[in-house]
Image: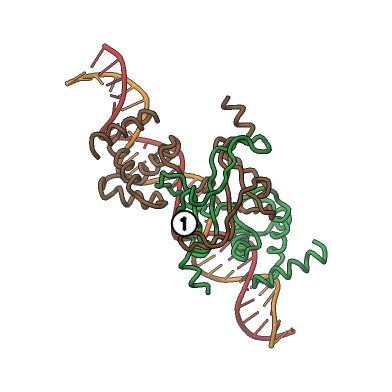
Chain colours: A green, B brown, C red, D orange
Amino acid sequence: MNAVESREFREVCKRAGLAVTHQRQVLFEVLKNMHGHPSPEEVYARIKRRIPSISLATVYKNIHLFLESGIFREVSLHHGSLRVETNSKPHHHLVCTACKAIFDIDANELGLAEKTGTLPGGFLAQRYAVDVLGLCAACQQKTV
Amino acid sequence: MNAVESREFREVCKRAGLAVTHQRQVLFEVLKNMHGHPSPEEVYARIKRRIPSISLATVYKNIHLFLESGIFREVSLHHGSLRVETNSKPHHHLVCTACKAIFDIDANELGLAEKTGTLPGGFLAQRYAVDVLGLCAACQQKTV
DNA sequence: TATTAAACGATAATTATTATCGTTTGTCAA
DNA sequence: TTGACAAACGATAATAATTATCGTTTAATA
């Protein structure tokens, strides 16, 4: 990491109220240089090559801090335990980023023009699952 | 459950190649009558009121069978372990329902008209996370 | 450079889920 | 109807992912 990147990282930490530690800095770099959607274990394996003594717990804690601070995002907004969809009508989800509540919205009410058929790359699109992220009415009140 | 519903359930099981058991039938009814996005534990609590001796393992096993057979869906397509998004550009996901692979696609390449601002119900929409479900090129070959 | 809060590493604990296994039940053919 | 056999069941052990705890180390800042 060069001087400019290092300064940037210090800025990022300052904004998030995080101390600048070696582990945190290397994790940041590693994540920036990974591709796709790595799991904490995969990140841990990678960062261990640079800091063999690092703990898996430190990786988890710092990934969470990065997510909370908006420095990185997670792939699935509602990962965690299995949930069954009981609404059989075509619908999408309104996900409140504050309270994590999920509301259903009818597909036609959201009115997206969903392209099915073959997409670039040869992917055959069959169905769209849309999460609209934002704030529910109740949480908008609270944050005012 | 009346005679018509019972016949329907038998049909559903026949199509899925599943035996018609009492536990399975009650689980089916309970799921049909629940709302939202219940977890297996919540379903278990509910079904226990009608079959106190039922095992949590049975609930899990049958929920999975229902999901595999397409009788119900699960809320998140890529639930399970935490994944970090390393692609900082606005993009969406192509999710292969066969091999579970996730490919990124640039938001503008997908070209959805995303309505932000306040939606019906007072939800403040800030960002869209779209999963396009279908089959990747490789899996289309296999299923031919 | 001394103080203090934050972060670290090791690891125990927890949670969600899956596997195992002996017993029971549903299916199907005779 | 019944008997054989596969499927499903309940109890619970095992596993995987994640989080909590706690004594030690390190960074912030006065």
Image quadrant in which the N terminus of chain A is located: bottom right
Q: Is residue D6 left or right of residue A70?
A: left
Does B103 sit above or below residue C28? below
Q: Residues within 10 Å of mark 1 (few under 14, many from 20)?
A: many
Front residue (pair B30, B83): B30
The local secondary structure at tag 1 comes to strand
At 46% across and 56% down in the image, what residue appears?
Answer: A102
Residue C18 percent across, percent down from the top left = 46, 41
Hey, which quadrant is residue A24 in on the image?
A: bottom right
Residue B96 percent across, percent down from the top left = 58, 38
Outermost residue to the right: A3
Front residue (pair A22, A30): A30
Q: Is residue A119 visible?
A: yes
Q: Which residue lies under the disc numbered 1?
A: A102
Q: Is residue C17 left or right of residue C22?
A: right
Residue C17 percent across, percent down from the top left = 45, 46
